Amino acid sequence: MRKVTFITAFPEFLECFLAHSVIGRAVSANLLEARVVNLRDFAVNRYGQVDDYAFGSGGMVLMAEPLARAVESLADEGATVIYPSPQGVVLGQELVESLAAVEHIVLVCGHYEGVDERFVSKHVDIEVSLGDFVLTGGELPSMVLVDAVARLLPGVVGRQAAVEDDSFFRGMLDHPHFTRPAEWRGQPVPRALLSGDAAAIREWRRDEAVARTIGRRPDLLSCANIRPYLSRRPYVLVSGEVGGLPGALSQLDGLARLYGLERIILVETDENRRQELSASVPEASRDERPVFKFFKMTRQALHWVSQREDGKPFLVGLETQASEKSLHWMEGKRRILESKRPLVLGFSEEMPECEMSLAPLRGGLANEKRIDSVVMLSVFVDRFFGCR
């Protein structure tokens, strides 16, 4: 979003919002072009009328003609017209990020009982709601939407890291914040934040974000990329049979680099076959770390992870056939985050010692068939480490 236009019968509502704080600085620095259009300039008569009684009884409704004239006066057919309404799509971070990519947003601020539905049908691209409640006008939700979208624009917020650490940006809630004094009315700031140890501070913030999300909004885990919140690094374990499938090594290499997997551990008992697979690994560029690690036995591989991560790995297996011990992958996310252990993902049948087995992939059709193993792993990994 580089340009925003408000259409309102009460332009004074927006003057303070556009003149102060972060949004005011964005407008002053020409990072955001903002315009307020007075709906009464397009009234149907010399008395400035823009509303009338609703047909069939009820309160006042903004008329279609003044609204249409106001939108058409902008002469921008590429603009996205948004009408804040209790009946709209609930505003969430995903929609905010999508709207940040729109060049020009036009916000039509309703009032009273709403606006004539014929205007909505002809001119409005999307209706947006802040939640299941009703406000007296559309100015407040319009300001909220612009505030949420504008802070994603480069330069609007001083530190981009501050935006990326906020609640919902990665799907999780933010960690608690503290400032001076170090002790306030008998309540001290957490010791880790006073330590000066950057690693300890990052770990404390990560753990608090996880605890808050699980405790307050566990539903967010369905969309969250948990990779930045893991206490230890993740690994994927596959058999030589899977690694030997046509094109599998190249696909696994891309999977590891895309989702930040520490290693693809490949277990093959046959030495000759293991050497063949090792020779087929895609070449990494000079600045890229190696992705594959080969072992003869699963036990050896897990021992290597334990030593490397200084902790026993948490083994999570994907089942290809449903069983009584199958867990939903959202429950899997929660347990992985709570374990604070290095993570090893793979197929349950190839990791007999796995501590948690997740239900197989389902398409919801009666004639489901097993798909390619690497594709299954890709979907599996994306559920944990994919960005919405």
Image: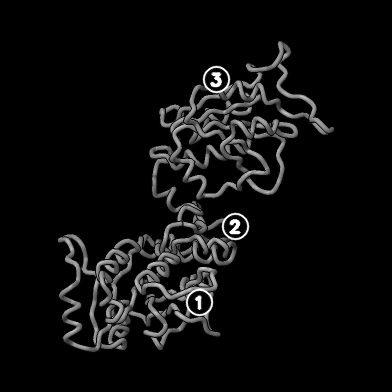
- Dot 3 crowding, Cα within 10 Å, few <14, some 14–19, many 20+: few
> In x, y percent, where is residue 36?
56, 24
Sequence-first disc among 2 and 3 = 3
> In x, y percent, where is residue 52?
77, 24
Residue 284 seen in the current view: yes
**Residue at (35% x, 60% y) in the render:** 198
Towards the viewer: 4 or 62: 62
Using the numbered discs, state the Cα–Cα distance from disc 3 to disc 1 in whole angstroms: 56 Å
Tell me the number on the disc at residue 359: 1
Q: Disc 2, disc 3: CB below 8 Å?
A: no
Sequence-first disc among 3 and 1 = 3
Q: Disc 3, disc 1: CB below 8 Å?
A: no
Tell me the number on the disc at residue 185: 2
Left or right of 141 on screen, residue 248:
left
Q: Which residue is mark 3?
A: 73
The disc labelled 3 sits on which kind of residue? Ser
